[in-house]
Image (spheres, grey):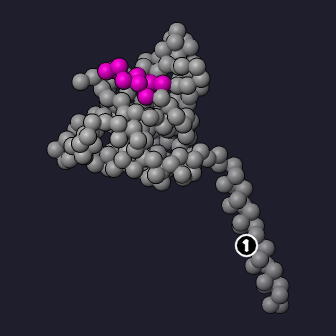
Amino acid sequence: MRTTNFFKTAFFALTLFAATNLSAQKEKTVTVGGAPMYPSKNIIQNAVNSKDHTTLVAAVKAAGLVETLEGKGPFTVFAPTNAAFDKLPKGTVETLLKPENKKMLQTILTYHVVAGKMNASDIAAAIKKGGGKATLKTVSGGTLTAWMKGSDLYITDENGKSAKVTIADVNQSNGVIHVIDAVVTPKS
């Protein structure tokens, strides 16, 4: 009897492990900042695990945008890395994170977000349709211009500064993230 219970328990455990493993295998992840990004999780649930996006996550928290980016969406987020924030003039990030600059920080962060889900192939199709450029309306009300250089996707802000998409199509439950190598800003 004891042996039978052991085998039942072992069989149950193996079945549960196999089902969990199969579920994980079906969920295609992309690694960003050393962490797997799960399509079943929302933008914030994934971003907090990326070592490359700690500055962005801190900024999103300081701007009070966590609930928004955990929301239904869908959103297309152009997510600057820590190295992208490091390219800004010294003291910029610290200044933006101050409570008195919350509105400015919100504007800059929502300038990196487009309503709807646009995978790289969607953006490339819009670029082709636009004769080499596509205008993307941001949640902040500004525009980004998407364009290609060879097979690389770029976005350019209203000030003429460009950012390269270094990792595209990081699918989320509420949209998609495209990792970029520079912070883009709305017209000054």
Q: Is residue 137 above or below residue 70?
A: above
Q: Position of residue 176 (x, y in %)?
A: 51, 37
Q: Quadrant of residue 77?
A: top left
Q: Is residue 182 visible?
A: yes
Mark 1: give few (<14), some (14-19) or many (20+) Cα within 10 Å.
few
Q: Which residue is mark 1?
A: 13
Q: Nearer the viewer, residue 31 or 44?
A: 31
> Which quarter of the rendered picture does the C terminus lie within?
top left
Say which residue appears at 48% left-offset and 50% top-offset. 50
Q: Quadrant of residue 83?
A: top left
Q: Nearer the viewer, residue 171 or 72?
A: 171
- Numbered disc total: 1
> Which quarter of the rendered picture does the N terminus lie within?
bottom right
Q: Is residue 156 magenta?
A: yes
Q: Is residue 19 above or below residue 174?
A: below
Farthest residue to the top: give it: 131
Q: Is residue 147 magenta?
A: no
Farthest residue to the left: give it: 100
Q: Is residue 103 above or below residue 142?
A: below
Is residue 63 toward the left or the right of residue 26 in the image?
A: left
Q: Position of residue 175 (x, y in %)?
A: 50, 38
Extent of the magenta region:
154-163
Say which residue appears at 48% left-offset and 29% top-offset. 164
Say which residue appears at 47% left-offset and 17% top-offset. 134
Q: Is residue 66 visible?
A: no
Which amino acid lies under the numbered mark 1 shown in the image of this protein? Answer: Ala
Q: Position of residue 8 (x, y in %)?
A: 79, 78
Q: Position of residue 127 (x, y in %)?
A: 52, 16
Farthest residue to the bottom: give it: 1
